Amino acid sequence: MSKAINPNRLSTAIAAAITATLPSLAVSADEGGKRLEEVTVTAQKRVETLQDVPISVAALSGERLDSIFSAGDDILALAARVPNLYAESSNGRAAPRFYIRGLGNSDFDLAASQPVSVIFDDVVQENVVLKSFPIFDVEQVEVVRGPQGTLFGRNTTAGIVKFDSRKPTWDTEGYAKVGAGELGTVNVEGALGGSLVDDKLAARVSFLRQERGDWIDNSYTGEKDAMGGFTELAARAQFLWTPTDNFSALLNLHQRDLDGTASIFRANILEQGKQGQLSDNFDRDSVYYNQGDNNPQEYQGAGSSLKLEWDLGDVILTSLSAYEGADGLSKGDIDGGVAGDGPGFIPFDALTEDRADVSQLTQEIRLASNTTDPLQWQVGAFYFDSDLDVTSIDGFYGATTVSHGNTSWALFGQTSYDFTEALTATVGLRYTYDEKSLVVGDQNVDGFALVIGAASVQDYDPINIDDDQLSWETSINYQLNDFSSVYTRLADGFRAQSIQARDVAFEGSPSVADSETITSFEVGYKADLLEDTLRLNTSVFYYQIDNIQLTAVGGGGNFNHLLNADKGVGQGFEVDLEWVASDNLLLTAGAGYSDTEIRDADLTTAPCGSGQCTVTDPLTADGLAMIDGNPFQAAPEIIFNFTLRYSQPVGNEGEVFFFTDWAYQGETNLALYEAKEYTIDNQFEGGLRVGYTSFAGNYEVALFGRNITDEENIKGQIDFNNLTGFVNDPRILGVEFNKNF
C-alpha cells in the first residue's frame, strides 16, 4: 500500500543518499594499482564524462552487460540491473515495457505510448515492437533518469534507455562468441570491422543468433516440448565515410527475425487470498491449453539511419535521418487453461491473436558549439512520422483492424555557461507539436459473434487529436573539489495525448487520454574517491505529474481503457557503489527507492472480472475499486543490485575469474487496484560466470548460469477470467567461449 508523502522520511532519504555510484566495470592499472577508468556518456547529445553530467545517469558496459545476456535473454533482462529501472512484458520478446523511478505504462496493446523512451544509435524507437530489437555488439547502455523533454522530446517523462553499438574503426578488429546451455540454448554472435579504404572508408558488420528449444509440455493435448522456445536472428552493418577532415557520414543498416513463443499464460497459478504466492496448480514445465496453437510469435524488422556531420570550425552541424519498420504476430491461449476443465475455475475460453505492421520516419538537424569557451550551446529541429496497423483477432468476435497515425515536430535548444571553473549552469527549452489519428477498418471478420447476432459492425468516426507543449529544464553543477561535485536539476516534460482502440475488437469504443505533464526536482552528488578506486553517484528526487495517463486493464470483459488521474507523485533516491577493493576484487552495488502515489479521490476501476481476487481497496456500490492513494502499477518500491568479480593471475599470460551478479525487486503492485494476489515482494535472481582469460591468446572460456537458484518469480497477471499469471525463465547453465581479434 502506497503511503502519503512524508517530508521527514524524504529528508532522511536525502541524508542517507549522498553516497552512490554507477556501474561500468572499466578498470585500468598503473604503478599504484588498479583504478576506475573515466566513463563517457551522451545523455546531453554531446560526449561528456559521467561525473560532469548534472543528470542521474547509469552506464552499463563490458562484463556486466555480457553476463546479463549470456543465456540468450532479451532486453527485459535489464530489469533491476540499474537502480530504479524495471522492465516487463505480457507480449513475449516482442514488446517490452520500461519503468524508471516507478513511472511507466502497463498497457499491453501494441499502440500503447510509453513514458520511457528507448533509443538505439541516436534513433528513437517509439513503438513497443521497435523497442525490442536484440542487444548485441553494444558498446554501452545508458539509463538517463528523470524527464528528458528538452533534448529528446515528448514521451520521456520518466527518462530514456539509450543503446550505442560499437562503431567502425580504422584498425581491423572484432570478436566471436559461442555459448551453449540447458534447454537447447545457443547464443552465437560476432563482429568484424576495419578500414576498407585507408582513412576514407571503414566498416563493421555484426550478427547474432539466439535460440532455445521448446521445453514446455501441453498436458491437455499430450504434446511434449510443445512451446517455450525461440530463434532470434539479427544483423547490423555500419559504414563510416570520411572523404575530408571536416565531414563524416555513418550509415547504419540493421535487421531482425524472431520466430518463437509468445508469453506463456498459466491459469490459476496465484494462490487465492495470499500475497503474490504461487499455488499448487503451478508447474513450470507444463501448461493445459486447448487453444492458441501453442502460443506462436513471429516478428520481422529492418531499419536504417544516416548520420552526417560537418565540422565547421566553431560549430558542428549534424543531420540524422532514419527509417524503422516491423511486422509480425503473437497468438495465445489467454485464459491459460480449459473452460470447465481447469486447472481451477475457468468460466470461458479466451483466445487472442495480435498482428502489427509499424513504420516510422525521423529526421533531426542539430547545430552545436565546438569551442572551449565558457558558453556552450546547441539548437535543433526534429520531425517524426509513424503509421501502425493493428489487427486483433478474438476467438469469439473475430478480427478487427485499426490504423493509428502520429506526426510530430519540435524545435529545441540548450545552453550551458561556466560562471567559474567550479560552477556551471544549464538551461534548455523545447517546443513540440504532436498530432494523432485513428481510423477503424474492418470489424468482426470471420467472427462467430457476428454470425449469431451477438455482435454487429459499429460505425466509428475517425479520431484526430493534437496538442502542443513547451518543455524546459534548468540545472546547476558545482565542483566541490577535484574529485566530487553536487548538482540540482529542475525539469519539465510531457507525454503526448494517446488513443487506445483495443476495446473496438470487443464491441467497445476507443478511448482518449489527454497529455500528461511532469515537473521533477532532483539533487545529486558524484565523486571519485580513494585515489579513483571508489565511484559514488547518487540522486534524490521528487516529481509531480498532472493529468497522469493510466490504463485500466481487465474487468469481466478484459477491456483496455485509457483514463487520466488528477495527479501522480513520486519520490525516492538512487544509490550506487563501484569499488576496486584490491587488484583482484571489484564490487558494485546499487539501490533504488521509488514511493509513488495516484491522487484522485473520485477515480475508480473495475477489479478482477473472475471475482477470485481479494481486493483490498474500498469498493463503490457498483463494485468498482477506488484507487486514490495506490502506488503506480508495476512500480517496484525497492530495487537492489550487486556484482562481485574476483580474479587470480595465472602466470603472466592469463587469469582465472569468478563473477556473480544479483538483482532484487521489492513490493510491486501488478494492477491499478490493490489485491493480495496481485502484490508481489522479495523477488530476486542471480547470475554466475567462472572462467579463464588468456591475455596472450586474447580469448576467454567460462561456465555461466542465469537464475542460478532457479527462482520462480511472478512477472505479471491477467485478471478478467481467473487468477492467470506468467513467470520468469528457469535456470540455464552453460558454457561460453569468446575470442577477440
Image: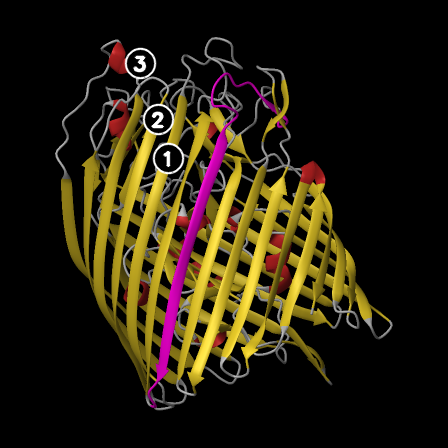
The residue segment tinted magenta is 284-313
Disc 2 designates what residue? 393
Indicate the amino acid at tag 2.
Ile
Q: Main secondary structure of the magenta part?
A: strand
Disc 3 designates what residue? 448
Query: Where in the figure is residue 241, as x and y percent of width and height?
Result: 45, 77
The local secondary structure at tag 3 comes to helix
Indicate the amino acid at tag 1.
Arg
The local secondary structure at tag 2 comes to strand
Q: Against 369, is 498 above or below?
A: above
Along the line of sight, which residue is nearer the eye, 258 or 87? Answer: 258
Colouring scheme applied when the structure was drawn: secondary structure
Disc 1 designates what residue? 355
Q: 581 left or right of 556? A: right
The quadrant of the rendering that contains the C terminus is bottom right
Whether 107 is among the magenta residues is no
- Work out which residue is located at the far front of the displayed protein and give it: 197
Whether 305 is among the magenta residues is yes
Q: Residue at x 60, y 17 (%)?
A: 219
Tell me which label, 2 or 1, sits earlier in the chain: 1
Q: CA distance from mark 2 to mark 1?
A: 8 Å
Q: Residues within 10 Å of mark 1 (few under 14, many from 20)?
A: many
The local secondary structure at tag 1 comes to strand
Q: CA distance from mark 2 to mark 3?
A: 12 Å
